[in-house]
Amino acid sequence: MRARRPNGTGSLYQRDDGYWVVAVSVGDQRIVKYRRTQKAAQELLSQLLVSQQRRSLIKTTGLTLDAWIEQWFDLNQPRLRPSTLQTYRQVLTPISTTIGTTKLDTLTPLLLTQAFLKLQREGIGQRRVQLAHTYLKTCLSQAVDLDLIAANPMERVKKPHWKPKERQYWSVAEADRFITTCLESPAKWGPLFAFLTTTGLRISEALGLTWADVDWHKRQVRIRQALVWSKESFRILPPKTPAGRRHVSLTESALAALQQLPRPMDQHMPIFRTSNDTPPRPDHLRPYLITRCDQAGVPRLHLHGLRHVAAMLALEAVGDAYLVQQRLGHSHVTVTLGIYGYPARKEAVIASAVDELLKST
């Protein structure tokens, strides 16, 4: 007969086959594990008892999903860009509103599934619901890592289906008309929009440029930083990815856009700035962009849409995804192909090229 352990300290005993059995109740779950040696079993028991104590603390303090999400934001703030953190908050807010008061250790796959269905019925977009699923799963995964919960209930919640619409951006003729309108019109921010449409820079990268980053002789700009807005303030950060540190060659249109702007004596001043020498907020640029689109007679786009147009122009011009990847600052060519590969050289070009190759032999 094995010795009886005090209540709350788990069970540890050896079976007839020599294996050691470890059993502990963590919350409402009975965990049973097996180890070959007594030492390994004792170490595991100690770990499980620590987890048990933490779970008891959660029950005592009543940590809710809402409270944990806020803690999760705080824990990850140092590694996240302000814009990313803001996106996480926006996406998870509907979930917090729906089931935020639920205690963390009482979350179940059924409860979470019902919450996501409720968001869909309330008209939250499928893509936003899908992102909420992804972010919440990551959030609760860290709760598991910290022994706040024994298992991640999101592992058994089916991810909402979302099929992205085929992107429809401008034709080459429309892009040319838009660039010409931006350069010929004296309206505000035209040079910035023309510059974005031909270089493919992220708006944060363009706003982070200074005149010292322009090499007029080589006709290129150096991307070394990004200016990121968060609420009412901005921060200068490194590029989004290591591949974001790059040099981007300038088209005639991009050069013309820069030449229209006043150059200060201080070469470290930002290229694109307001009359107060401060960088513009991206959301404040939206009305000006809409006006330029209407003037050019092209479909309206958001600022990031200009990056898509630039990628399309580059792919149409050279048909080399690897070159375009470097120009856009993507970490891998699969990102470029996955997002922007749709308008690359038409598939029929392959057949024609193979015909030409065979004829040359």
Image (cartoon, grey):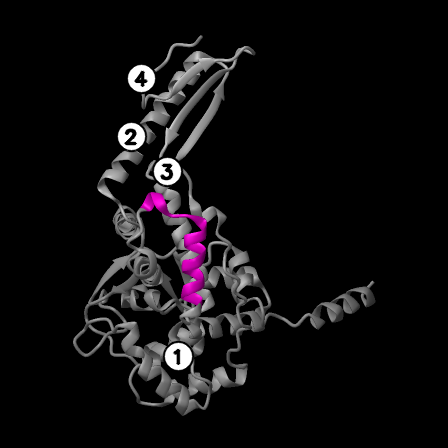
Pair 3/4: label in front:
4
Foreground tag (1 vs 4): 4
Dominant secondary structure, magenta: helix
- Estimate how packed mark 1 is, as few (under 14), some (14 to 19) or many (20 or more) residues with alpha carbons within 10 Å: many
Find the distance from the CA under tag 1 to the CA under tag 4: 75 Å
Over which residues does the magenta segment extend?
Answer: 104-120
Circle nearer the viewer, 3 or 2: 2
Does residue 274 appear in the picture of this structure? yes
Secondary structure at numbered mark 3? helix
Q: Which mark identifies residue 11?
A: none
Marks 2/1: CA distance? 60 Å
How far across and how far down the image is residue 308, in percent?
A: 47, 71
Q: Could you say which disc has been placed on residue 6 in the image?
A: 4
Q: Earlier in the sequence, mark 1 or mark 4?
A: 4
What type is the residue that disc 4 sits on?
A: Pro
In the rendered image, which quarter contains the N terminus?
top left
